[in-house]
Image: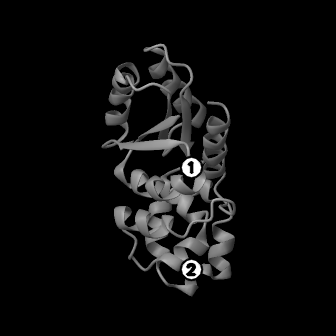
């Protein structure tokens, strides 16, 4: 079986290219296809789902919540999939943006930027619920003294992430969804 991940942005690909080999069983292949934002992803979904001819492939769509209603966003993405009669696509919403996943693992951020201050008690308290942080990218820049840059940061932080200890609920839901797909080919 192969999993094809349709992603909103290239930084998500950078992250998942590092994490997926740790998550997936060795016999499961994967491919991450980044897009240039939400509208590019939404235009691409029916084209990819309809045109993909490789057998034994399952699709996973990963989309940031940003300021959208999570349930409505997921329903909208399901409707796009149904236009090409695909109802078995796993849709996962990142709450609120990819950087929320990174804030869910401050130890990984600390190691990536070689900074013990990131693990200060005020940060640990502030980021107990990283999915509720509306400006996660800005918070990440703040705690890394403006060192965080989207692509480089995705590569740096993902290398240290502990998939079992991440405090982001949307990250944990993503991990469970991928595991379930692998169990039910």
Disc 2 from disc 1: Cα separation: 34 Å
Figure check: 96 above or below 167: above
Q: Nearer the viewer, residue 83 or 126?
A: 83
Disc number for residue 26: 1
Q: Which secondary structure, mark 1?
A: loop
Residue 70 placed where, x, y %? 58, 37
Residue 45 at least partly seen: yes
Residue occupying image coordinates x 63% and y 82% = 120
Residue 134 placed where, x, y %? 53, 55
Residue 101 placed where, x, y %? 56, 58
Crowding near the residue tagged with mark 2, few <14, some 14–19, many ≥20 C-alpha atoms within 10 Å: many
Residue 165 placed where, x, y %? 69, 63
CB under 8 Å between discs 2 and 1: no
Crowding near the residue tagged with mark 1, few <14, some 14–19, many ≥20 C-alpha atoms within 10 Å: few
Earlier sequence position, callout 2 versus callout 1: 1
Q: Which secondary structure, mark 2?
A: helix
Give the residue at mark 2: 118
Disc number for residue 81: none
Residue 69 at least partly seen: no
Q: Residue furthest front?
A: 27
Q: Nearer the viewer, residue 16 or 12?
A: 16
Residue occupying image coordinates x 61% and y 59% = 130
Looking at the rendered structure, the number of numbered marks drawn on it comes to 2
Residue occupying image coordinates x 62% and y 65% = 162
Residue occupying image coordinates x 49% and y 27% = 77
41 to the left or right of 81:
left
Question: Closer to the observer: label 2 or label 1?
Answer: 1
Split into 4 quadrants, where in the image is the C terminus? top right
Figure check: 96 above or below 70: below
């Amino acid at each position: 079986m192969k999993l094809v991940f349709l992603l909103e942005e290239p930084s998500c690909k950078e992250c998942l290219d590092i994490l997926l080999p740790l998550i997936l069983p060795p016999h499961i292949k994967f491919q991450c296809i980044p897009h240039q934002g939400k509208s590019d992803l939404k235009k691409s979904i029916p084209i990819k789902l309809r045109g993909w001819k490789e057998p034994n492939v399952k699709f996973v769509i990963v989309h940031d919540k940003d300021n959208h209603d999570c349930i409505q966003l997921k329903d909208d993405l399901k409707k796009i999939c149904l236009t090409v009669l695909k109802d078995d696509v796993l849709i996962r919403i990142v709450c609120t943006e990819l950087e929320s996943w990174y804030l869910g693992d401050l130890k990984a951020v600390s190691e990536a930027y070689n900074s013990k201050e990131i693990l200060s008690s005020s940060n640990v308290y502030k980021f107990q619920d990283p999915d509720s942080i509306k400006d996660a990218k800005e918070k990440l820049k703040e705690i890394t003294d403006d060192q965080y840059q989207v692509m480089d940061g995705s590569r740096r932080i993902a290398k240290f992430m502990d998939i079992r200890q991440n405090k982001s609920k949307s990250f944990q839901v993503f991990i469970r969804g991928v595991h379930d797909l692998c169990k039910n080919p």
